Amino acid sequence: MASQQPRFGVVTDPEILKRLAEYRGVWVYAEVDDNQLTNVSLELLAAARYVAQKTKEDVSAVLVGYGIERFARDLIVHGADRVYLIQDEKLKLYVSDAYTEAVSQLVLAKKPSIFLFGANRNARDLASRVAGRVNTGLAADCIQLEVNENGQLEQIRPDFGGKELSVVLTPKHRPQLTTIRPGSYKPLPADYNRSGIVESFEPRLAEQHSRIKVIKSVRERLDPKEDLEKAKVIVAGGMGLRNKDNFKLLHQLAELFEGGAVAGTRSVCEKGWLPHHLQVGQSGKTVSPKLYFAVGLSGAIQHLVGMQNSEVIVAINIDKEAPIFKVCTYGIVGDLFEVVPLLIDEIKRVRIERTLTKESVKAESAGER
Amino acid sequence: MGELNIVVPIKQVPDVSELRLDPVTHALIREGVPSVLNPYDRYAMEAAIRLKEQFGGRITAITMGPMQAKKALQECMALGADEAVILSDRAFAAADTWATAYTLSVYIKTIPYDFVFTGLKAIDGETGQVGPELAEFLGIPHITYVRKIEVDQSSRSVRVERQLENGYDVWEAPYPILMSIAREYGEPRLPTLQGYIEAKRKQVKVVTAADLQKMGGDPKYFGLKGSPTFIPKVHPPPARPPGTVWEGDPKEAVRRLVEALSEKGLV
């Protein structure tokens, strides 16, 4: 990692400044996988709008594939001012060489200032190779973007499993390429009054640009109950659960909430108590639900980096020294096998009470009539 | 059917499990932390060894870093690397992924290779970018997240499976090619004592910036000054405002918790 001498980050050479000024616009890579736009594509648009409002630029989405025009409208209603549509039969499914060439040709032709990609596997694969092709810097796995007083993009990322945060700048190269961890931003609500331009771009893909052939592409769609990135409430368990069977308890709690899902720490998933796609943390998913229950998990930094953007965090742990109590909104020090059943009962009781109160209010007002 | 030449770029990294935060400043304490071979690179070595076992060939392990990184290369030789090369020079210091990939490519271009195998990422920087960037500078295709490799020597091509978050792909490509090897490829073996004894007899080749320049490398792309990205500041993660924690009677604690959640409209 670079040393801490800020002078390197400030560009004063007029020649370089002039060259940098030729690059305008905030782009996002709109990824189609399994015949649908990925969640992170819409999250990137939210990040891009935030940045574009500071740099006073517009937002473009780069949509790559074949027979995918139908997604352009989704991108516009979620924040894109323009959609670049790159279609070619060779781009029907993601493949590193043809996609790199097509996207790089567009970059070299249109010169964006900023280009955001998801930090999921295929998009970061593409971003890395594009950075090599167009010779620019790429900051990986960022969780937050800011614009500094010099108009440079501050790309903020966790290092060493979240033990520290680095601010990455790309001072003299354009575009400033970034991959953003899924779950770091929330998509903007769809605005059907928004309008935008759809512009087609035809890449020239020679034989040498598509040496790799896709033989097969197998995808499994997630059960909505297991889609952690979309879940509104997550009940996560750690080693305190003691065995696979006890996760039933967490399911009972999660089922009380619409859009509730169960997740776990790395240890839990490695033990096989939960499948790997339900792992939250550095080597798993980054999530930001409205409500996150951390049950019987200590809060290792690698876990915290994946859930600390949750709006409300509730910690339940027997060890009052557990680090999770330092980040929680509410915490209960106690035995989860006692606390969670009580919690389930209390939520049910409060809800019944609330319904009864409403009904009695209705009954009273009906009586007055 | 010829033997295969395989290059494995590796990295020496601080042992993350040994990293601690300063309790007062919350800054990372780097002093005295032991260095190890990046755990993800073991999968790349494993893939190289299996191909060598199947087809015969030579494995070259290569790294860029301070001279102490020789230790990680010795481990690779104990595992079965035939040669080891360290690119070491103050001019290479503080390189980002782009400059690292460029520097490695200058040397790798001078040796014969059919395959370049990397780990998915390093546990310190965790970018996973050096592999694809290196392939770009070498002018060869790359495939990431590889869990299975079938080599067809007659057509000089591979058929591989790539592990994704929501499934997998099967791709076919000609080699020479660069691949990053996923955990699903298979458990990497550990070096044996016999391996370490044999490794002692082998030399690590040291390559400096001046050497790379003779090979056609452009020094303006080495190290910090060759890096497009720059890190002006590093800081500890922000602390959340302290929360409310209840101890004692669990019934009372649960009642208060649900009351608080109700006020926020969450239950």
Image (cartoon, grey):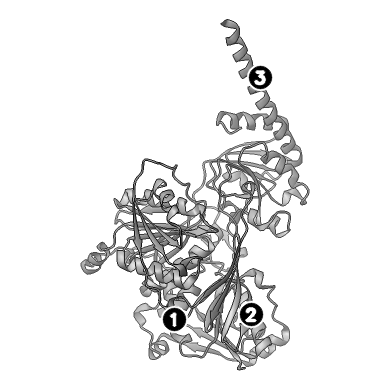
Q: CA distance from mark 2 to mark 3?
A: 66 Å
Do the residues at discs 2 and 1 belong to one chain?
yes
Under mark 2, the amino acid is Glu
In the picture, residue B222 is in which quadrant? bottom left
Task: Residue under label 1, please give it.
Answer: B139
SS state under label 2:
strand
Instruction: Give x and y (percent) for residue B220.
Output: 34, 79
Do the residues at discs 1 and 3 belong to one chain?
no
Task: Residue under label 3, please give it.
Answer: A356
Task: Residue under label 2, please give it.
Answer: B150
Under mark 1, the amino acid is Gly
Q: Tell which subunit mark 2 falls on.
A: B
Instruction: Give x and y (percent) for residue B267.
Output: 61, 32
In the picture, residue A193 is in which quadrant? top left
Q: As rendered, which of A255 and B236 lies closer to the eye? A: A255
Residue A333 in view: no
